[in-house]
Image (cartoon, rainbow, N blue to C red):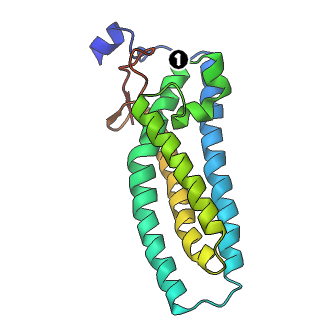
Amino acid sequence: MVDQVAQGNVPPPASKPIILGIVAAVWGAGGVFALLLFAGARLSAVVAAGLDFPWQTIHIVAAAANAVFMAWSEGHRGFGQRFSPRSAARLQWLLYHPSPTRALFAPLFVMGYFHATRRLRVVVYSLTVGILAAIAIVHALPQPWRAALDIGVVIGLAWGAASFAWSLRQTLAGRGEEVSPELPAGGENESSRRTC
């Protein structure tokens, strides 16, 4: 850590973020939370509407299996172990390294859509295409199948919002393990690693 501070890769602990960094970080965190909560609320309405339809045993089994699978894969692995710690690290980096573009598009920066490693950008854009395709397919299903599948996504999104809040708390408090913000090679402060 001392070497990184000396090289200018990590702001010294006593340094203070500038106003643009604070605004960008608040907008970045708020935008990510808004996206997760909006998607969760919309899908919760779909699940609630699905409860008005008659459910057979197969629908109940599918909903339970999907809920467990999505809690583990989307919630724990996707959000808890990958997205949330990395996004919190990117948000903390943004706090100390704002630019007008990164501040304006802070939620997209935090999620890794730009100023990120090639690997992260490929993952983020691939996931976006996959999610949009899944939405189109599930939207075409009749109720209560939509509800049976969307209940798992709601659980994953709720887990995601909670894990992002936890990761932000840990990162901004300087506790936890080191997580890379996955900045581009040759990019500004590329080797910066923040705790999460």
In the image, is residue 131 above or below residue 150? above
Identified at 63% across, 26% down, the residue is 24
Identified at 54% across, 85% down, the residue is 59
Q: Mark yes or no: residue 67 visible.
A: yes
Name the foreground residue: 34 vs 124.
Answer: 124
- In the picture, measured across the screen, residue 106 lies left or right of residue 124, that is right
Q: Identity of the amino acid at label 1?
A: His
Name the foreground residue: 17 vs 180.
Answer: 180
- In the picture, measured across the screen, residue 19 lies left or right of residue 63, that is right
- In the picture, measured across the screen, residue 86 lies left or right of residue 162, that is left
Q: Which residue is mark 1?
A: 97
Report the quarter where the N terminus lies.
top left
Report the quarter where the C terminus lies.
top left
The percent coordinates of residue 39 (x first, y second) are 65, 56
Identified at 38% across, 21% down, the residue is 192
Name the foreground residue: 121 vs 52.
Answer: 121
Q: Residues within 10 Å of mark 1 (few under 14, many from 20)?
A: many
The percent coordinates of residue 138 (x first, y second) are 60, 68
The percent coordinates of residue 97 (x first, y second) are 53, 17
Identified at 49% across, 28% down, the residue is 92
The percent coordinates of residue 83 (x first, y second) are 45, 44
Q: Mark yes or no: residue 181 visible.
A: no
Q: Residue 68 is drawn in which quadrant?
A: bottom left
Q: Residue 151 is drawn in which quadrant?
A: bottom right
- Assign a secondary structure to mark 1: loop
